[in-house]
Amino acid sequence: MKQEKAFVKEITPQSKDFSRWYIDAIKKADLMDYTSVRGCIVFKPDGYELWERIQAAMDQRFKDTGHRNAYFPMLIPESFFQKEKEHVEGFNPELPWVTEAGGEKLEERLALRPTSETTIGQMYSQWIQSYRDLPVLINQWANVFRWEKRTMPFLRTSEFLWQEGHTAHATEEEARQETMQMLEIYREVVEQELAIPVWKGKKTPRERFAGAVDTYSIEAMMKDGKAVQAGTSHYLGENFAKGFDIKFLDRDNQLKYVHTTSWGTSTRLIGSMIMVHGDDRGLVLPPRVAPTQVVMIPVGPAKLREKVMEQFDPLFDALKAAGIRVRADLREETPGWKFNEWEMRGVPIRLEIGPRDVDKNQAILARRDTGEKVAVVLDGAVQSVKDLLDEIQQNMFQKALAFREQHSHLGIETLEDLKEHIANKENEQGIPGWVLAGWCGEDSCELKVKEETKFTTRNIPFAPPATKSTCLACGGEAQDTVWFARSY
Amino acid sequence: MKQEKAFVKEITPQSKDFSRWYIDAIKKADLMDYTSVRGCIVFKPDGYELWERIQAAMDQRFKDTGHRNAYFPMLIPESFFQKEKEHVEGFNPELPWVTEAGGEKLEERLALRPTSETTIGQMYSQWIQSYRDLPVLINQWANVFRWEKRTMPFLRTSEFLWQEGHTAHATEEEARQETMQMLEIYREVVEQELAIPVWKGKKTPRERFAGAVDTYSIEAMMKDGKAVQAGTSHYLGENFAKGFDIKFLDRDNQLKYVHTTSWGTSTRLIGSMIMVHGDDRGLVLPPRVAPTQVVMIPVGPAKLREKVMEQFDPLFDALKAAGIRVRADLREETPGWKFNEWEMRGVPIRLEIGPRDVDKNQAILARRDTGEKVAVVLDGAVQSVKDLLDEIQQNMFQKALAFREQHSHLGIETLEDLKEHIANKENEQGIPGWVLAGWCGEDSCELKVKEETKFTTRNIPFAPPATKSTCLACGGEAQDTVWFARSY
Ligand SMILES: [Zn+2]
Ligand SMILES: [Zn+2]
């Protein structure tokens, strides 16, 4: 059992060093690997399959709401970036540039896309002439690049995978409805499929997308109390329409600018899911997206294996036929070693059958989320597994919700209180979590909080759990009630 | 009806200028658009949906044969290319290079991947230690770059989309089986889904992939008689294993190099499909991949429209409920204008209902592939449409097969005969097509044929329709029977 111990020991406990725990957990679960290119990772099959399942859930909803996929060039001429002033300032520092191709130096540098508003704006200006051409509802699945200084697998990498929706509308009202519709789709997928509770809300001007009129986000709390922006939806107003001259002849025979939106989610959802649900034994994957939902392991002495397999094999086939993603681990390792391995990988249910279980016409189901074991009748095992997968999915969401509530602080009114709160939590090795506080609307107050505590505004929730009347930083009248937290 | 005429006139006839016809047809069908970046196109929604359907058909088969998807970085350090000599010579001239990122000049240039053998080889050398780690069966869906001098939408673009499979095996035998298995999957998808008949065969050494031991391909004949290599599968032997030091400890306790394969198909399949099936009225899409399978158009005078719609609407719903990709065109245009539009777009079936059809309890189905019209009973229309879609799919394949046979020449024995054949065909505005001929195995003979006729070796078919005994170029003994043709 030496190997067994070693495995567990290699994952740093969350309480000791959460970032180390995260890296250990995803490495042990074989989700990714580092590469020779700075900040670029390999998405290994189990990691990529998580993305494929997120993609499928998103893509179906995009299509159900009338969007279609398209693909635009990855390379963007430098001159395109100049057309929207805030946009170029926001992204320029992070761009990789192609300067040579086919053995020649290029006349104009080409950026690797950090996002495609510019390329798509350029095309929309050619495609849209009349109100009959609207709305344009397009999504793209693509790789994008942001050459960031500090990287973290899945959460922030030089190259990552994402979807970016880009729509154009005749009116502001319709564009704003689209912005909200897509934010709601994000909430639904993230809460229902990934079991991550999120706050929908509006970003402050300082935190909004470069070139947007309004940015909305869904924000999730990780197990270290930090926040992840899990998806954003932007109302871009006429900013890109003016930059790229996207005009249409309306029903009233007037030439008008379109109103555009963009919205995106990325492979950082994988990282969020791991940080929300994982524990000291490794990953805990929500059943709806887990590559393997059930791992079956025969137990008991080798000489009785044949007897066990007479029940084991048909149950495996029955689970598979029922559409459950089941895997049998028949390797020549100890059950204990296997238990650890599949716990690290976050498989929702471990199903054990031993000789005594066969005698009792039962199988043992061990839940990854709670560690509980239950015996179920063999004949009804398929239904029991299905029910338990649903229960685990729901329980994981409820557990994350309870954790979030436990670490959301609604009674902090001043910056001094916040500093004291942080100091207290740090003293007791606790988690400062999130703070709901008032904000007067001034950039300077937001910046002051950030500089003194590293807490930034996450978003202004649409449905805050309380309403605040005074600004956290200046004590003046609050314009908004805002979530403040440290973030990834 | 001025608009109607204009539409058709804008597609150049195939016999006049096939390349012009191709560009006109895909532009009118709204599949793609040009961009400001040389040789890069936009895949518009109808063009991208063709790719999504090809992807779905391929991906299912990859997974059914035990492969999993992963994602590797797009950027490849220059030094990686140096590790396989033939590979670097083959791809170096076509690479775009990133030389600056995040505001700094990079120490080592990074190539935009033209294919990922090098990156993946580097990772496999770390992942594979023992025979227990084998086989590794991975596929990647990705964008790739080849900065080619002459480009053509879908067929050859600076950036394109593809899948690349990369597998590692303990033995040559197993790797060769994999190579053949994937070639067969390509044949199946291309013939069954895209209705394109192909020849499976082996490429000559001159035409093989840079770094491969053997390259196999499926080759298809376009309507201008030229060939398209529609998919390739490579047995790479130990070449990349040696370049990247991918070794494993075998059961016999010996350290051995793995045997690798790679295989790919790309968005050039979209171009092939158009060039195989299209006609002077525009696209003709195979039902299995067509974004719209049936377009419904109400006909007859406006004052009787209500009566028509009483039958039209429920039929639309019934077709949709049956899983048929149906679209209703209710725009205020003439039926003739609509007919032309949907013919250009290649929709397999046009379904018309007018007042007289309602009286007769019927609908009219017009086939895009043959132009034939049939009346079907309204109550059974869903089944009639389903049957007709199947029939069109089969008929398109048979038609393409007959075309291929008509333009395959098996009786040309010498280079002089070939030149005469070409001259005759060109005199009568005909198509030289493909020539099955013997080849002695010498590069020089292959090159001579190419230089004097622009005919290149396509592949050495596994099951040639005849066996040739003398070399086309030198008259010496034939080692292989080879397809020669001009190609894209
Ligand atoms: Zn203030
Ligand atoms: Zn010869």
Image (tube, coloured by chain):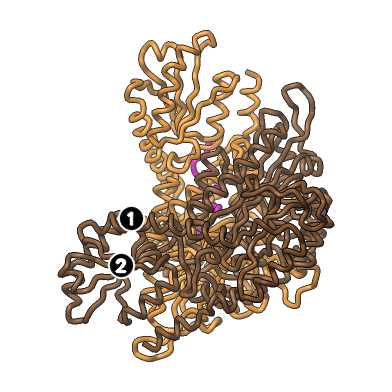
Chain colours: A orange, B brown
Magenta stretch, overall SS: helix
Q: CA distance from mark 2 to mark 1?
A: 12 Å
Residue A314 place in picture, x, y as percent: 41, 23
Q: Look at label 2 and name its amino acid.
A: Leu
- Residue that label 2 marks: B351
SS assignment at label 2: strand
Q: Nearer the viewer, residue B479 or A486?
A: B479
Left or right relative to A212: residue B113: right
Left or right relative to B343: residue A52: right
Q: Nearer the viewer, residue B397 or A325?
A: B397
What's drawn in magenta, residue-wise?
A: A265-279
Looking at the image, which residue sits at the far bottom? A253
Task: Please name the residue shown 49% across and 19% down the image.
Answer: A298
Task: Please name the residue shown 44% across and 47% down the image.
Answer: A196
Q: Quadrant of residue A248?
A: bottom left
Residue A56 place in picture, x, y as percent: 45, 51
Task: Give neighbour class at mark 2: few <14, some 14-19, many 20+ (Cα, 10 Å).
Answer: many
Q: Is residue B46 above or below residue A364?
A: below
In which chain is the residue bearing label 1?
B
Q: Quadrant of residue B43?
A: bottom right
Residue A61 place in picture, x, y as percent: 39, 57
Q: Look at label 1 and name its amino acid.
A: Lys
Instruction: Confirm whether the magenta stretch covers residue A31.
Output: no
Q: Quadrant of residue B349?
A: bottom left
